[in-house]
């Protein structure tokens, strides 16, 4: 894995290694998009809300042994937190097309003792979603891209099980309004 400055952070019940964002500053502010692997500490509340929503979903549908897919995992923080903090998780699928991200996800899964719960892949997100659809689908799919979620919605709908939950995050209103693609 190509070397770059990294630090340990704690978020929820996870302890993860992420790029040292102090080394990727634009205009006196850390810029996660400039790091070799994406991790945005400002989205911790979003990740915590996603966990609360999925726990509510699990309680509402009365399902245990759920499978969660995060096809755009970056550092893997969300996948690790899902495995540690969501009730009734059987399996979490973490994926990123980037070799550096893939290696960092594997490291973070291993350091949290989750190799038996989190399956890590290095593939195009849409290819992974189509494979999951062919294999019977997931209960929860979480799309949190850098940019528009639109390219991933159709295959997410193919890959989600009946009465499943699709979580979509877009932090840029311009992307959602069609100003940027």
Image: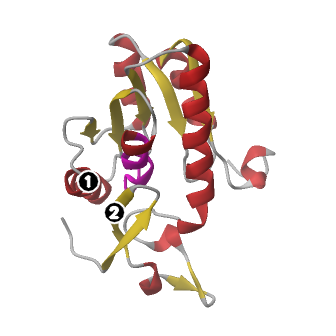
N-terminal of the pair, mark 2 or mark 1, is 2
Q: Nearer the viewer, residue 38 or 85?
A: 85
Q: Nearer the viewer, residue 13 or 106?
A: 13
Q: Nearer the viewer, residue 139 or 5?
A: 139
User: Residue 10, relative to residue 162: is it above or below?
Assistant: below
Residue at 37 percent of width and 44 percent of height:
84
| Picture quadrant where residue 26 is located | bottom right
Residue at 77 percent of width and 53 percent of height:
173
Which residues make up the magenta segment?
73-82
Please say if the residues under marks 2 and 1 sit with CB atoms less than 8 Å apart: yes
Counting from the top left corner in percent of width and height, residue 153 is at 59, 28
User: Residue 88, relative to residue 107: is it above or below?
Assistant: above
Q: Is residue 165 visible?
A: no
User: Tag on residue 99?
Assistant: none
**Disc 1 target residue:** 112
Residue at 32 percent of width and 53 percent of height:
98
Q: Is residue 167 visible?
A: yes
């Amino acid at each position: 894995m190509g070397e770059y400055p990294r630090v340990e952070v704690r978020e929820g019940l996870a302890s993860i290694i992420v790029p040292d964002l102090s080394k990727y500053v634009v205009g006196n502010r850390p810029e996660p998009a400039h790091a070799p692997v994406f991790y945005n500490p400002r989205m911790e509340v979003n990740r915590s809300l996603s966990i609360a929503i999925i726990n509510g979903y699990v309680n509402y549908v009365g399902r245990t042994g759920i499978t969660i897919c995060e096809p755009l995992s970056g550092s893997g923080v969300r996948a690790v937190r899902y495995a540690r903090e969501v009730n009734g998780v059987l399996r979490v699928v973490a994926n990123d097309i980037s070799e550096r991200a893939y290696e960092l996800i594997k490291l973070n899964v291993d350091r949290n003792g989750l190799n038996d719960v989190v399956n890590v892949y290095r593939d195009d997100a849409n290819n992974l979603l189509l494979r999951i659809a062919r294999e019977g689908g997931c209960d929860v799919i979480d799309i949190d891209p850098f940019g528009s979620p639109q390219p991933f919605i159709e295959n997410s709908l193919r890959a989600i099980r009946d009465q499943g939950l699709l979580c979509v995050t877009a932090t840029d209103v311009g992307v959602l309004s069609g100003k940027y693609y």
